[in-house]
Amino acid sequence: MSRAGRLRDALEALRAQTDFAARVKEDPVSFPRRFEDPADREIAAWLAASLAYGRVALFSAALERVLEAMGGKPRAFVERFEPKRDLALFEPLYYRMNSGRDIACLLFLMRHAVRRHETVGAMFRAGWRDSDADIGPALDRFVAELDAVDVSAVYGRNARPRGLAQLFSRPSKGSACKRLNMLLRWMVRPDDGVDLGLWTFVPPSKLIVPLDTHVLRIARYLGLTRRRTGGWRTAQAVTRRLAEAAPDDPLRYDFPICHHGISGRCPVGRAAALCRACPLLGECAKGRALTRAVTAE
Ligand code: SF4
């Protein structure tokens, strides 16, 4: 069997073993999935993806507080958001690098998106070109438009503190843009119980993998990349290898791979017993080495 065929079989077996319903509860996509209206889902998804770094329990608690401050109606709140009136709701909030003001500014920029373009999807679509090789140039245009918005109404001057800037990484600056690529996966991939399938104007084949530490680590074990550091080019390289297994939808394996790491079923350390039961073992250099070493002992 070809290398692509072996990889596809292994990744499909991983998908089949993944308990999607259980894992979604441990994933930030559970926040937009609470809402039925696509307009609420878009806003809740952008917010959830933006704060989805660090431990799940911590960012989930922060997201609960922000959604509560928004009255549980994300789209309606963003449309009517007025910094002068509403900043006080967010001042007491913070999450790691993001102050309450940074979170309020994110909502202010969402307001720009929906007031100017009607929906976040329409704003992204304005920068999308069918001829683009992947999602990168459109993502860059999306962030460039937001970077040009005057944020004095939130900060008192038109400056972007670090806590805001880290929410808006750009492919052209070399960032892997993990959280924005995760948002795009949610929006673009068809609704399979995880992703939301709202932005049908982008083919899933143009997405780039949201490269977090778990995905990079397991991608290295599987020989999908030799790079040790994440970045846009590494994310593109991993996506190209996943596309060998699923050319029309390479990110169908992203959620199962990521949660293989998050769940502890593929730990960082030695775990030969887990490797023996792992559907990726045949394609995994680390797993083969670990199980050989234990057998030889
Ligand atoms: S074989 Fe072991 S190291 Fe490789 S992906 Fe599976 S659990 Fe992880």
Image: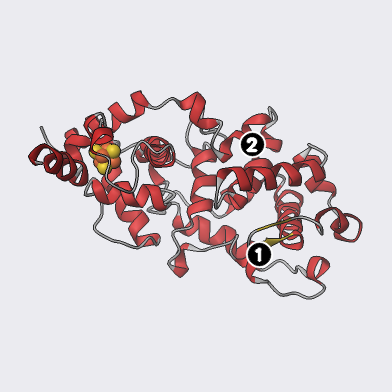
* Amino acid type, label 1: Leu
Residue occupying the point 23% across, 45% down: 222
Does dot 1 land on a helix, a strand or a loop? helix
Does dot 2 land on a helix, a strand or a loop? loop
Residue 171 drawn above or below residue 207: below
Place of residue 164 in the rendered image (x, y in percent of width and height, measured from the top left): 66, 64
Q: Which of the labelled discs sits on residue 277, or is there none? A: none
Please identify the residue farthest to the right as the structure is shown: 85
Q: Distance between the residues labelled 2 and 1?
A: 21 Å
The quarter of the picture where residue 280 lies is top left
Earlier residue among tags 2 and 1:
2
Residue occupying the point 51% across, 56% down: 138
Q: Which of 38 and 51 is in front in this view?
A: 51
Residue 133 drawn above or below residue 75: below
Contact check, label 2 and label 1, Cβ < 8 Å: no
Q: Nearer the viewer, residue 128 or 46?
A: 46
Please identify the residue farthest to the front as the structure is shown: 297
Left/right of residue 272 with respect to residue 59 in the rendered view: left
Left/right of residue 29 with respect to residue 79 in the rendered view: left
Res. 155 in view: yes
Residue bearing the label numbered 1: 164
Number of dots carrying numbers: 2
Q: Which of the labelled discs sits on residue 31, or is there none? A: 2
Residue 13 drawn above or below residue 128: above
The quarter of the picture where residue 196 lies is top right
The quarter of the picture where residue 57 lies is top right
